[in-house]
Amino acid sequence: MKQVVQNYKSGELAVLDVPVPGCKPGGVLVRSAYSLISTGTELMKVSEAGMSMLGKARSRPDQVAKVMQSVAVNGVPATYRKVMGKLDSWTPLGYSLCGVVEQVGAGVDDVKVGDLVACAGNEHALHAELNWVPKNLYAPVPDGLEPRHAAFGTVGSIALQGVRQGESRLGETALVIGLGLIGQLVVQLLTASGVRVVGVDPDPARCALAERLGAAACGDPESAAVEGAVAELTGGHGVDQVYLAAGGGSNQPVELAARLCRDRGRVVDIGKCRLDLPWNAYYEKELDVRFSRSYGPGRYDPEYELEGRDYPIGYVRWTERRNLACFLDLVARGSVDVEPLVSRVADFDDAVETYRSLKDGELKAVAVLFRYPDQQADAAGAAAPEVTVPAVKPPAATARQRPAPAAGKPVRLAFVGAGNYATSMLLPHLARRDGVELAAVVTTTALSAANARRKFGFAEATTDLDTVLGDEGIDAVFVVTRHSSHAELTRKALLAGKAVFVEKPLALTGDELAGVLAAVEESGNDRIQVGFNRRFAPLLREAKARFGARTGPASLRYLVNAGGLAHGSWYLRQDTEGSRFAGEGGHFIDTASWLLDADPVSVYAVTTPGNEDLQVVLGYPDGSTATISYVTTGSPGFPKETLDLVADGRVLRLDDFVRASVYGRKKWVSSRLPKARDKGQSAELAAFVGAVRTGGPMPVPLESLAATTAATLAVRTGLASGLPVTLAGAR
């Protein structure tokens, strides 16, 4: 495996091939997904390594004292050999990462192989492809939290422990000196606790970032604005706490702390800055000076960190591990937002160059992440994930594909599933359509089948799917069940030689999609339609016709005001039914692709922390783009779907399938439709039944159905990596 190392004597950095660590009892072997560079602690170490021997001695007087003690005991030659041997060796870097459990050691029962965990420790959460991490130095990542955000767990725990040491209370005011990575996190944690924050940093960009993340005011330590803000917020009394998150050799932070702190306030040292306390200033205010020891109780205790001996919660409420889990929960719930802190995501193989850029000042950064190989592969050469669209091969045979019904005979349909969507949006259209016979309905419970038979006139109601699929008289099967069963039921119906109408989604995983397409190839039956009905909506079709053909790339914006879900909705069962967007996002991707007359070739997705709001950007072969804003936090009084298509000096506007307009040399505006919106279900069903009756092509090419499904699935991949996803093999 590969690991980032440094020679402290020469300052040389390298990515070395080293053996994979063994999985010892009491811990887990973790494959890194993302690791975080501490732009404070690690850069200080890197900078020290580049100093002369005298410079190293000046920067670490504590180590010089140890050397002198060794000289007194062991003599100069032995001490010299010992010191040089230690300096002239590779040392690790890194202490905060997120990865996937690859192996579980004996005595560990709280995680399993494949679980996502955040890891801590400068001996265990290293910049390396694999790390062995003891039990008390990892915590499971909450569902929905992106790995790149979970990689902040350790530095977040450091900031959290500092805030705990300050004992802040609702309504108090705090001063944070130093707005680097730790300082920015302290600002957010305090703000989330109901504390008003004033920030101090000489960098205007960092001050602006802290204000964006919740600080009441920020400024340069030399600026009168900081003192003015403190006076205004505290009525002239001074802040309740000061958090020292700065580094360097200046004594200015502790002097500023004394000046702006109230009588008997608290000063908490989190960073590593000079601490020559001005005695009079601290004595006269009786300031309480506290130190925050890294991630929390347990740090530097080998029985806790290495042997896994936890402290009883009744005596030590917040240990290292509990702090780590708490911070991850805060990020997962949106109380802390780490994404604005990410200045760059670099490939792990580029670690040496990344450190050099940081050390030389070419890269100005708050936080930098290393992305490991399994998270890589790029649109421009080496970064973005790639999702393969399974190849749609021409059917190898047609022996099992059912011929079109004889002239004059009705198209006989079977429904698998008779839930709310089937009974409200599909069956009412089919029940009154000439030339259609509802032959059989199959459900898992006898009563629902009987109800559907009574209401819509099915000839047969049953719970036996195999009998229905084996009925030679059935021409087509509708799959309208829970999402998790769509792919398998579609596969079975195709292999039985039936035409298939499957409600979206076609599949919830890439393997399921590949299985459906394999069934097409095996059976020679490509008679399939997915319920992407919006492209059949009469109003949208007329608007597209009036917009006309394009000559240049287009920009499309699609706002879906999806709204929240009722408690108990089966859409919430993401472990079995997939995410909400996986279930219905194909609707909007298909509509965009139909309007742009192409299938997407790339997908980029981001989510809003704490809810299901998504922004999905699709790229198309001719340079066109489509942005789908899928939001659940909007007003229920606002229309659900609005769409704008812009190209060649023209604009197409759709307002929730009630009104459409086209702006060009001439303006066209449709009349307002009745309150009942026509989203195309009736026309879609007519097209499907017509194709089954005549044996003609299906309404939507199979290649397009596969591409839309793959693009929908790629949203999840993109959210996990934070990178654009290339749809390999897409048209």
Image: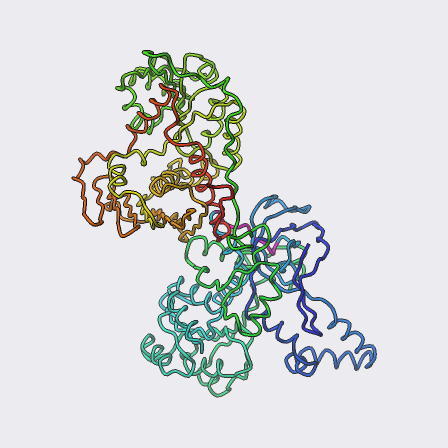
Q: Residue at x 56, y 54 (%)?
A: 118
Q: x%, y% of residue 74?
A: 82, 78
Q: Report the residue that reaches farthest toward the left.
A: 671
Q: Residue 258 at x, y = what percent?
A: 45, 82
Nearest to the observer: residue 309 or residue 71: 71
Q: Answer left or right for 231 relative to 726.
A: left
Query: Compared to 242, does 307 lie above or below?
Result: above
Q: Nearer the viewer, residue 270 or 415?
A: 415
Residue 563, by quadrant, is top left
Give the image quarter of residue 216: bottom left
By what rule are the colours in the image chosen?
rainbow
Quarter holding residue 584: top left
Q: Is residue 181 above or below residue 557?
A: below
Is residue 338 highlighted in magenta?
no
Please tell me whether residue 646 is drawn above or below residue 699 in the rendered image. below
Residue 23 position within the rendered picture, expressed as x and y whole percent measured from the top left: 70, 50
Work out whether residue 370 or residue 729 is closer to the camera in this orientation and state it: 729
**Quadrant (top left, top right, bottom left, bottom right) of the N terminus:** bottom right
Q: Magenta segment range?
A: 136-143
For the residue pair 101 and 268, the one nearer the viewer reads as 101
Q: Position of residue 595 (x, y in %)?
A: 33, 41
